[in-house]
Image (cartoon, helix red, strand yellow):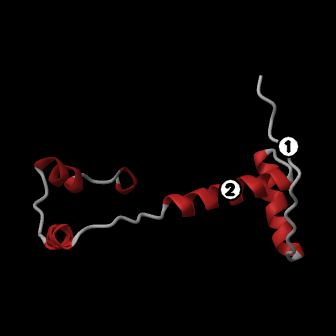
């Protein structure tokens, strides 16, 4: 069985008593220690920020085609029209 990674780096932050109380409450609701809750939350936010980066490169011709596709009007499919015409569950 693989050994868990050693936790030997330290992250220190300062906060107000009010913020710490909110974080403690949230951690307790999840059944976690404050440090576990903060690390999980920070890691999720970090991964989301990293995954949100979408960079791609196009030559001039492909770029023009891409812009044309973005600017082109689209016609919704029958399925999409039916979906949009349905009354939402919360509006019934």
- In the rendered image, residue 50, in percent from the top left (x then y), is placed at 55, 61
| Marks 1/2: CA–CA distance | 17 Å
- The tag earlier along the polypeptide, 1 or 2, is 1
Crowding at mark 2 (Cα within 10 Å: few <14, some 14-19, many 20+): few
Residue farthest along the bottom direction in this orientation? 16
Q: Which mark is residue 43?
A: 2
Name the residue rendered at 22%, 50% in the picture. 83
Viewer-side residue, 89 vs 75: 75
Viewer-side residue, 43 vs 9: 9
Name the residue rendered at 85%, 43% in the picture. 6
- In the rendered image, residue 42, in percent from the top left (x then y), is placed at 70, 60
SS category of the residue bearing label 1 = loop
Q: Quadrant of the N terminus?
A: top right
Along the horizontal axis of the image, is 28 left or right of 40? right
**Residue annotated with mark 1:** 6
SS category of the residue bearing label 2 = helix
Write down the quadrant of residue 75 in the picture. bottom left
């Amino acid at each position: 069985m693989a050994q868990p990674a050693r936790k030997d780096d330290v992250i220190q932050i300062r906060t107000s008593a009010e913020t710490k109380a909110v974080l403690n409450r949230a951690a307790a609701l999840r059944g976690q220690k404050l440090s576990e809750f903060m690390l999980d939350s920070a890691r999720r936010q970090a991964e989301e920020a990293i995954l949100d980066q979408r960079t791609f490169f196009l030559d001039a011709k492909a770029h023009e085609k891409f812009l044309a596709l973005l600017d082109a009007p689209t016609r919704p499919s029958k399925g999409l029209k039916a979906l949009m015409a349905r009354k939402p569950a919360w509006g019934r």
